Amino acid sequence: MRGFPKEEFINRIAKLRQLMEKNHVDAIIITSPSNFRYFTGLDSYFWESPTRPWFVLIPLLKDPIAIVPSIGLSSLEKTWIDNIITWNSPNPEDEGISTVLNAIHSLKIQKGNIGFELGKESFLRMKINDFRKLENQLQNFSIIDSSPLLWELRLIKSQNEIDKIKDIIAIASKTFDNLASKISLGMSEIEIANIFKKDIIDNGGDHTLYLACTSGNNGYDQIICDPTDKKTSNGDVLVMDTGSTKDGYFCDFNRNYGFGEIAAETEDCYRCLWQATERAIAIAKPGVSCSDLNDEMLKVLNQFKNSQNSVGRMGHGLGLQMTEPPSIMKNDKTALEKNMVITLEPSMEYKTGKMIVHEENILITENGCELLTTRTPKSLPIIN
């Protein structure tokens, strides 16, 4: 089914309230697209218009209240949320701020802690000046960072979420598995990327919101930019890293392709990264920390001469957003737990400006992990 049953959202709110009670939080105000969708189920990319903010007020003791511009009323009425308040928008002089304040005052709480998305991997989707207005009008309350509570909740995926993530990963895996037979030496990055994006749709995906696609002789120098009209040539390695979605949930993994004759050192680097990923898959289980995964992959990479990792981490969480906490890096001591979905992403700059990156997606299970992606070939696929 598309979306989730009402019970899924009720459970999310109940779990959040347990965290709120434990941390003495009286209400949380949500503004970011991913958290808004997580708690309401609204399926929309209207967020691409920055004109209007959207709010969800989640009190400790009362039902959630959606506070949205009038254009959103009909859409919100189709979600599980019963309490919906609107204001006429655009209204730059008062873009929902007085409406939010009235909703807070309706809770009949005189003081306490009100949480906003202020911290780690979070942001406010509203004007900072309007946030300051709220702060000034809520001086009886302490404005706190609610992002630790929100991420503690979202780190662990429900079975319904896992099913959706598995679905889009299977679609993207099938697309990658068939891509080599559809591309050839001399095609441009854009031509190859367009074949991939079309096949994602044909195979059942909704969107390819992110597709880094770049190539270079025996390696590439970045892994974040859109494809260009550069044509692949003999000796090139092309990487495609996709964040495709279905029903709101992301996959995030990549594949590498060699064109024509590839240097032996490049192929050795590729195999070393494959082994590093294999090592992480072998040890990933509840209780193992993100830093443990990082260190074990790094041990494998350090067996390769001239190895460097310039990306900053070797993986991350995955779900409603393409990248979520935790980070697979040396200083992230987060312990893996059952039903976390994470990426494993070792990378190596084996020469200046020559990088290779591998990425797979795994689910943490009771005693280990489940590889969700089709495993990338052990040797670099060659396109002629």
Image (spheres, helix red, strand yellow):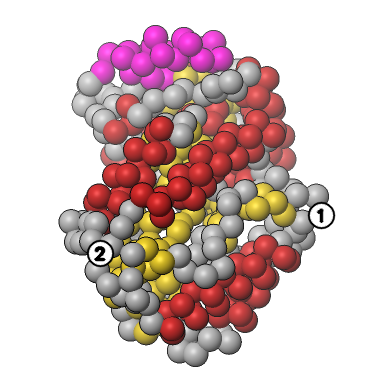
Relative image position of residue 4 (x, y in whole percent):
60, 22
- Under mark 1, the amino acid is Asn
Image-quadrant location for residue 189: bottom left
Instruction: Check residue 232 in the rendering and tell me which mark sits there, or answer none.
Output: 2
Q: Which quarter of the rendered picture does the C terminus lie within? A: bottom left
Rate crowding at label 1 as few (under 14), some (14 to 19) or many (20 or more) other CA atoms within 10 Å.
few
Magenta stretch contains residue 76: yes
The answer to whether residue 140 is seen in the rendering is: no
Q: Nearer the viewer, mark 2 or mark 1?
A: 2
Relative image position of residue 24 (x, y in whole percent):
66, 39
Give the structural element (helix, strand or loop) at label 1: loop
Rate crowding at label 2 as few (under 14), some (14 to 19) or many (20 or more) other CA atoms within 10 Å.
many
**Residue at (38, 56) in percent of width and height:** 240
**Residue at (27, 24) in percent of width and height:** 94
- Under mark 2, the amino acid is Thr
Magenta stretch contains residue 331: no
Residue, disc 1 = 367
Give the structural element (helix, strand or loop) at label 2: loop
**Residue at (33, 71) in percent of width and height:** 260
Q: CA distance from mark 2 to mark 1?
A: 43 Å
Q: Can you name the residue that lies furthest to the right here?
A: 367
Relative image position of residue 96 (x, y in whole percent):
33, 23
Q: Which of the two residues, 190 or 39, is positioned nearer the viewer here? A: 190
Highlighted magenta segment, given as a residue range:
67-89
**Could you tell me how many numbered marks the image carries?**
2
First in sequence: mark 2 or mark 1?
A: 2
Relative image position of residue 194 (x, y in whole percent):
29, 44
